[in-house]
Amino acid sequence: MSRVCELTGKGPMSGNNVSHANNKSRRRFLPNLNDVTLISDALGQSFKLKISAAALRSVDHRGGLDAFLAKAKDDELSAKALKIKKEIAKAQAAA
């Protein structure tokens, strides 16, 4: 499983460990990913996603999963999240 947020596309970054003696060795900065279950209001269904803590705060700030996905760019979303976004759009168009 890759360490990439399904909603924001945030992934690992690289940098240096710097010792007290100023020796540098490469390291990875991993995103703070959590397995969460988010509920879609339009579909009345819950979805399990692996998202970063920052993305979870953004979902809450925008007013839920439906509102977040409506404003999200398609190229940042995972295939699973993109499928959810299209189902939500179809359900809202029908209602």
Image (cartoon, rainbow, N blue to C red):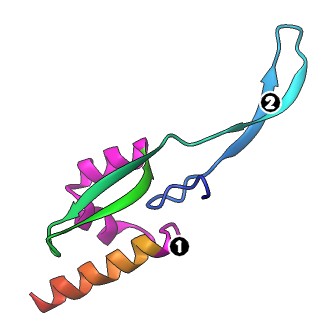
Residue under circle 1? 75
Q: Judging from the image, what secondary structure is the residue with disc 1 in?
A: loop
Nearest the viewer among 78 and 75 is 78
User: Can residue 74 be seen by looking at this rendering?
Assistant: no
Task: State left or right for residue 38 relative to residue 12.
Answer: left
Looking at the picture, does residue 6 appear above or below residue 28? below
Q: Indicate the quadrant where residue 19 lies.
A: top right
- Mark 2 crowd level (few <14, some 14–19, many ≥20, 10 Å Cα): few
Which is the main secondary structure of the residues drawn in magenta? helix
Q: Judging from the image, what secondary structure is the residue with disc 2 in?
A: strand
The reply to whether the magenta stretch includes residue 38 is: no
Q: Residue at x 17, y 89 (%)?
A: 93
Name the outermost residue toward the bottom: 94
Q: Residue at x 47, y 61 (%)?
A: 6
Where does the magenta region start and end?
A: 53-79
Screen quadrant of the N terminus = bottom right
Report x, y in % for residue 69: 33, 68
The reply to whether the magenta stretch includes residue 54 is: yes
Report x, y in % for residue 56: 34, 47
Marker disc for residue 16? 2
Amino acid carrying label 2: it is: Asn
Report x, y in % for residue 86: 33, 83
Amino acid carrying label 1: it is: Asp
